[in-house]
Image (spheres, grey):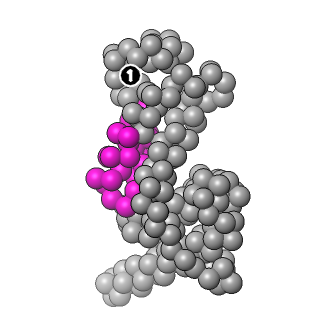
Amino acid sequence: MSLKKLIKNCKKQDIKAQEALYRIYADKLFGLCLKYSSNYHEAEDNLQDGFLTIFEKISQYKNKGSFEGWMKRVVINTALQKHRKTKFLQIINENQIEEPEAEVDDERLDQNFLLQTVQELPDRYRQVFNLYALDGYSHKEIAEMLEISVGTSKSNLARARNILKEKIENHQNNNSVQSL
């Protein structure tokens, strides 16, 4: 079945079409959920909630632009909305904005280590880091999505980068010591 037909059937709330759409995109969208979740279980919940929202709002998709891109946006917004409901903000002095330079040895860092390190960031830092560094949103867009100021977005990104830099350097130093 073509993607257009699948979307059309999902708009009619055809359960088999919804199941087929889930099977096609679940793995890719789960990877996205991992970026916006603090752990595997939360990512599973975000994926489930994201698909529920996709099926609920699929009639809003007008067959213009990438359907996969539309679904990614829905999943990201669903995950961010969960965090917005808890309304926890981490206040940071906006004057401390620095752009750290991370020096990574030529050795390859384990992808699982990198994913875990990003997931261990405080929620707001992780969200801003993922939106800016991995998904290409501007600070203005991030500020609107997260209901924060542009300065807060920038400072949260800087803090996330500092934390990641420190953890990567510690990991590399520990690996250097172990290899001796």
Indicate the position of residue 38 as horizontal and vertical percent values. Answer: 37, 61
At label 1, which amino acid type do we have? Gln
Q: Residue at x 58, y 36 (%)?
A: 69
Q: Residue at x 42, y 60 (%)?
A: 86
Closest to the observer, 16 or 147: 147
Q: Residue at x 56, y 63 (%)?
A: 129
Q: Taking the image as drawn, is residue 108 in sight?
A: no
Report whether 54 appears left or right of 143.
left
Q: Taking the image as drawn, is residue 158 in sight?
A: yes
Indicate the position of residue 61 as horizontal and vertical percent values. Answer: 58, 25
| Residue designated by label 1 | 18
Report whether 11 appears left or right of 15.
right
- The range drawn in magenta is 25-49
Q: Residue at x 50, y 29 (%)?
A: 57
Identify the main secondary structure in magenta: helix
Categorize mark 1 by other alpha carbons within 10 Å: few (<14), some (14-19), many (20+): many
